[in-house]
Amino acid sequence: MTVKIHNGKPLVPSPGNKVETTRKQPDKTSEGSPSVDQVKISTFAREAAQLKQGHELNDPARAQRVAELKQQVADGSYNPDPQKVAESLLKYLREQD
């Protein structure tokens, strides 16, 4: 099976953005056993992941905020502002067009 991670489209899934997958018939290797599935990650996706990881490690204030939010979600005290959530969601959806 081949999974195409990035093909120039946004990395974040949206209603019109699907992950492309294809399935091949198992190939036989020279020993007669089936070949294994492979995943190929584009250079862009690899670099984006590295940048994201590096950014999170270098920003202690953000790391602290994320830890606080995770704790609030875990203990059930997280209470986001529905108006801000709706505005952010609409902004994101507009950017996808």
Image: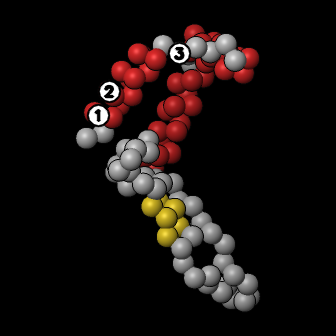
Secondary structure at badge 3 equals: loop
Query: Badge 3 is on which residue?
Result: 80
What's the distance in space between the residues labelled 1 and 3, CA to CA? 22 Å
Q: Nearer the viewer, mark 2 or mark 3?
A: 3
Q: Which mark is residue 91?
A: 2
The colour mode here is secondary structure
Query: Badge 1 is on which residue?
Result: 95
Q: Is residue 32 above or below residue 39?
A: below
Viewer-side residue, 74 vs 62 = 74
What's the distance in space between the residues labelled 1 and 2, CA to CA? 6 Å
Visible in this render: residue 9? yes
Residue 5 spot, x, y in % from top left: 48, 54
Determine the image quadrant of residue 94.
top left
Q: Amino acid at mark 1?
A: Glu
How many C-alpha atoms fall within 10 Å of the one at disc 1: few (<14), some, or many (≥20)?
few
The number of discs equals 3
Secondary structure at badge 2 equals: helix
Determine the image quadrant of residue 18.
bottom left
Say left or right for 92 vs 22.
left
Residue 79 spot, x, y in % from top left: 58, 14
Q: Nearer the viewer, mark 1 or mark 3?
A: 3
Say left or right for 65 vs 8.
right
Residue 31 spot, x, y in % from top left: 74, 88
Q: Is residue 1 above or below residue 52?
A: below
Where the N terminus falls, by quadrant? bottom right
How many C-alpha atoms fall within 10 Å of the one at disc 3: few (<14), some, or many (≥20)?
few
The disc, 1 or 3, on the residue closer to the chain's N-terminal end is: 3
